[in-house]
Image (spheres, grey):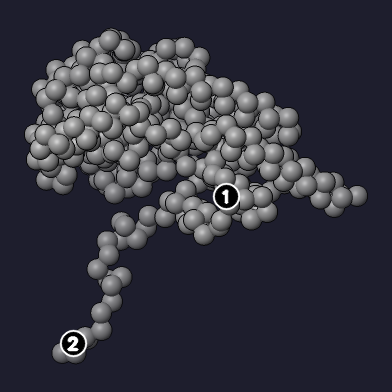
Amino acid sequence: MTISCGFEPQRFISSRVKSLPPSGIRCFFDLVANTKGVISLGVGEPDFVTPWHIREACIRSLEQGYTMYTSNWGLPELRREVARYLKERFGLEYDYQHQILITIGASEAVDLALRTVLEPGDEVLIPEPNYVSYKPLTRLAGGVPVIIPTSWEKGFRLTAEDLEKHITPRTKLLILCYPNNPTGMVLSDEDMEDIALLVKKYNLLVLSDEIYAELRYDGPPRSFASLPGMQERTILVSGFSKAFAMTGWRVGYVAAHPEIMAAMVKIHQYTILCAPIMSQMAALEAIRNGGPEMEKMKEEYDRRRRLVVSRLQGMGLKCLEPQGAFYVFPSIEITGMTSLQFAEELLKEEKVAVVPGSAFGDCGEGFIRCSYATSLSELMEALNRMERFVDRKLSLKEAAVK
């Protein structure tokens, strides 16, 4: 028998992991990191520093010696406050002891939910364009992503008609993310009610990613779980990153039926154990007293939103007005460029970073995602540079036609 001593690392890597593409966002920002003087409209992160009273709560907790583990579920006080918030804000009743889990951001909650409920071959319905982690995490959990394309013409909204066309006997779960990343669009009450009827009809479960729920500009936030009969069928995922400017603190939460939650905690306790207590203490202060700062940040985002949409439309780029989050998703079709080509050349020629729409799925091709979670002065300068870039590309296109 011949024994080979050569080490072949690829032999030891799971085929499931090998099949995953790298994140379209992160790949692009590897380029950004090596370019000086860039104004970034790419990263989905508030430009505001976490309010001082929240940071102070963390500092105070460290001074008082809060450096230990918490319960797997998270601090009881924080879970109680999350339950209170969900009741006051959305009319949802959750038992904080058995139905709310504190996680490492909303991202861990999404991963936990998928690994908890999916069997190999189960189909997961994912409206597109969508957040970049949904499809890879579905595959890692053994599920099969089933993409539901949405369009500019329909306002990038999921309709019940399009949803029903994609339901099969293997369908188990529908993922919703509204306000949406990357489009900033929301579902109307009628849209949600029609979707809820199909969820009941076909006995489905819903994973509702509501991390941007508080950043809605066309009215008060609404949770899919608040629709009649939907709370028991909904795994509600949210967190503190976006509304409270706490991205680096990595605190999220998930609320669901007690039996589903008990199963999720099994995975959480073996992989994460608990979210850092210092971050949980900061989150506790945020949810108790952070409302006024949250509203001020939201007002500023709203001002930037209207500015960006107006400027992009003035450049000749088709752009729907987003009703939530802090993204716009304009079409760059008139330039004749692909999304990636537009983003790469804009970065190279004008040092402005945006995300190619193709990073969010095939039907994102022809669009770019711009975040307006950056200072007004930098936003204005970035838009001036983009306008120069678009004018230049349109002039070259016209000259080529002549």
The answer to whether any part of residue 209 appears in the image is: no
Query: Quick one: SS at disc 2?
Result: loop
In the picture of the structure, the residue carrying the numbered disc 1 is 38
The answer to whether any part of residue 220 appears in the image is: yes
In the picture of the structure, the residue carrying the numbered disc 2 is 3
Give above or below for 7 relative to 300.
below
What amino acid does circle 2 point to?
Ile
Query: Quick one: SS at disc 1?
Result: loop
Q: Earlier in the sequence, mark 2 or mark 1?
A: 2
**For mark 1, does the 10 Å Cα neighbourhood hold few (<14), some (14 to 19), or many (20 or more) residues?**
some
Give the distance between the C-alpha atoms of the residues marked 2 and 1, in whole angstroms.
53 Å
Q: Is residue 265 left or right of residue 136?
A: left
Residue 151 % position (x, y) = 57, 31
Question: Looking at this view, is 259 or 315 the one in front?
Answer: 315
> Which quadrant would residue 202 be assigned to in this image?
top left
Marks 2 and 1: which is nearer the front? 1
| Disc ID at residue 150 | none
> Which quadrant would residue 75 be assigned to in this image?
top left
Q: What residue is shown at x 16% (from left), y 19% (from top)?
A: 80
Residue 287 % position (x, y) = 27, 21
What amino acid does circle 1 point to?
Val
